[in-house]
Image: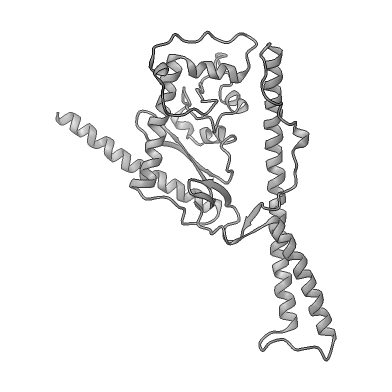
Amino acid sequence: MAHASKHAANSYGKAGELITVLETEVTQLLVKAETADSTPLQDGLTIQGEIVRRENRMAQLKTAREVIEARAREAAVLEKAERTAALAERAARAANGEKLRGKAPAGPESVKETPLPKDQYNYTDPASRIMKTGSGFEQSYHAQAAVEIDSRLIVGERVTDAPNDKEQLVPTLASIPAELGKPDTVLTDSGYYSEAAVAAIEAPGPDGRPETEVPAAVVRTGHHRSVADLEKHDDPPPPGPGATARERMIHRTATASGKQKYKQRQQTVEPVIGIIKSAMGFRQFLLRGKAKVSLEWSLVTLAYNMRRLHRLGMHALMAQAA
């Protein structure tokens, strides 16, 4: 969570209402200033001072609305791209003879670029956003981490103000220093999956083959395994040449090798986040502003890595002693 109260914020709609009220009050104060026998203000207050205070408040509210409007336009661009991709995938499945279920998603032309009345701007940390957490909705940042499987060291980290993971896979992978090289496999859950992200990461290398493979969950599934899930099964047949990217990914993670690879994601990332939150006690940022919060997250991940390296060194010493 961010170091900012969600109560220190205004919604787009409320800010507009307050601007109207303040404009009316400024007009009333100007009239009062021109009327010699008007009722005086309370002791210590001046008409000019009250006008300036309201004009400054209006400027803050107008800035807040402009920021919210810009965010709405940015979100609309991403939403249009997602809907375009979804419609293209549906059309490809139909062309492949697949029976489609459900109503087709709305097209990109239906996406609105205007903010919702409830969209918020926070004055104590304007860069933070309202995001859904385990306890409800909080003023937050979204911390990202790339973890190496064998060592469980954090090899890449970054902070974003976007509540959605769909656009985070490529930049989070790019946060891994070039000195470490490109990973041959990137494991990610359904929240990060998008056809565009996988295509970007699996772009062909110098030899014409992708240098990195992305086994990603496409659909969310429960953790419970039925008796049928426990039984040994042959790998499903590969999809045909006209299969969509989604169908190919489903097959990739449905094979025995794909399941084995993807199983490592939960065993790798979840313990790291759990240690940072529970063992290290880091559950909220103490700084404000995206730049400072990013630095704070870098220090947290560095502290985790030093802790982990100490543990790995102890294990190595014990192994040598044995």
Choose top left, top right, bottom left or bottom right for residue 229. Answer: top left
| Farthest-out residue, front | 227
Residue at point 31%, 43% (across, down): 307
Image side of residue 81 versus residue 1, left or right: right
Residue 23 vs 257, above or below: the answer is below
**279 to 204, vertically: above or below:** below
Can residue 268 be seen here? The reply is yes
Does residue 46 appear to the left or right of 153 in the view shown? right
Is 192 left or right of 105, judged from the image as shown?
Answer: left
User: How did the renderer colour the structure?
Assistant: one colour
In the rendered image, the vertical position of residue 217 relative to residue 283, given as above or below: above
- Residue 205 seen in render: no
Counting labels gives 0
The foreground one among 322 and 49 is 49
Q: Residue shown at 73%/31% (left/top)?
A: 106
Viewed as shown, does residue 111 lie left or right of 220? Answer: right
Q: Position of residue 19 (x, y in %)?
A: 75, 65
- Considering every residue shown, the one lying at the far left of the view is 322
**In this orientation, which residue lies closer to the viewer: 32 or 298?**
32
Q: Is the C terminus in the top left, top right, bottom left or bottom right quadrant?
A: top left
Q: Give the percent coordinates (x, y) of residue 257.
A: 43, 15
Give percent across and percent down for residue 20: 77, 65
Residue drawn at 67 percent across, 15 percent down: 99
Quadrant in which residue 192 is drawn: top right
Task: Examine the rendered structure and indicate whether residue 275 appears above or below residue 54.
Answer: above
Task: Identify the residue at image location x=31%, y=38%.
Answer: 309
Which of these two is toward me, 256 or 69?
Answer: 256
